[in-house]
Image: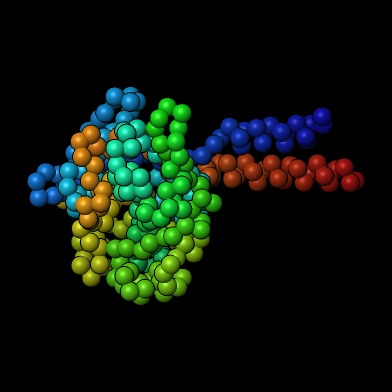
Amino acid sequence: MTASLLRVASLLGLLAATGAAQAGFTSFVIRDGSMNPPTIQSNTDYVPDGTEFVIYEGGQKAALGSDDISGFTIGDINKLSITRHDDTTRFTAGSGPAVAPYFNIWVTDGLGNYAVIANEPSNPAFQSLFVDNMDGSKSYNLSYDDLADKTAKVYETPGWNTDSSWVHNMFGNDPLTFADVASLTIEAPDATYIMNAANGVGSGAPDELGTYEAYGFNWVFGDTLSNYVSGNEGYVVSGAMATVPEPSSIALLGLAGVAGLAVCRRRRS
């Protein structure tokens, strides 16, 4: 093998080892209830790093949120994953508690407008992506390709329920897919924006109760209705992840391409 080809192989090997940027997650309560707030606690019965979300009643919501992929577009998403360890068979197949959590993504057009883009977990096409693991757990391991043709719902912005939001003005009426909104940038608004009633952000939006702090990507537990009540034991999860290609990986791919072109040119000369 020539020195040039060795350099290309080395670059490609480094690219493969670099992997993807993994998001770090913070747990927070979105909305409490009339009796008790949702409980977020450690649960090591299944895995050492398990976290349990107990949703006692309809209207309660909590989440795992991350800002690590903020600034990228929905189309940049490489992987969204989380593993559920508690027994999902205690719930009706296909019901909210059986397929939880769902996700919310804050997006912006870069012009001061924000909205939440959410998956539709009641959709059987999405439920089929919740896969069984050999240890009895279940996981979402979603690539952008998995999401592209799935329904994307718009919330937390004026006009979302009348197809007249800024998102619908850009991309058309419902039903929208994740491919339709792929160009939107992942970014959460600040507390001032969320607290301004003119912006149409409701109490169920993915922001922290009391502080209004929000994160770009969120795995959500609970709902406005009673269709995501977990009971006790709650939802026990681990391995939350949201990734996009690392800038260093992209740069290495470019370098490998340049080196490869150089080899071709030398062979032709």
Residue sitting at 43 percent across and 43 percent down? Answer: 130
Describe the colour scheme in one phrase.
Answer: rainbow
Q: In the depicted view, which residue is nearer to us: 22 or 36? A: 36
Question: Does residue 263 show up?
Answer: yes
Q: Position of residue 165 (x, y in %)?
A: 35, 72
The picture places residue 63, in percent across and down from the top left corner, at 28, 45
Q: Quadrant of the N terminus?
A: top right
Q: Residue furthest right?
A: 269
* Above or below for 136 versus 255: above
> In the image, is 63 to the left or to the right of 240?
left
Depicted 194 relative to depicted 208: above or below: below
Along the line of sight, the residue nearer the viewer: 134 or 30? 134
Q: Give left or right: position of 213 versus 35.
A: right
Number of marks drawn? 0
Spot occupied by residue 37 in the image (x, y as percentages of width and height): 14, 44
**Front position in the image: 18 or 163:** 163
Residue 102 position within the rendered picture, expressed as x and y whole percent measured from the top left? 35, 49
- What residue do we see at 37% from left, 52% from top? 121
Write the residue at 72% across / 45% down. Answer: 258
Residue drawn at point x = 13 percent, y = 49 percent:
33
Which residue extends farthest left?
35
Q: Using residue 180 as the reference point, say whether residue 166 is left or right of it.
A: left
Visible in this render: residue 101? Answer: no
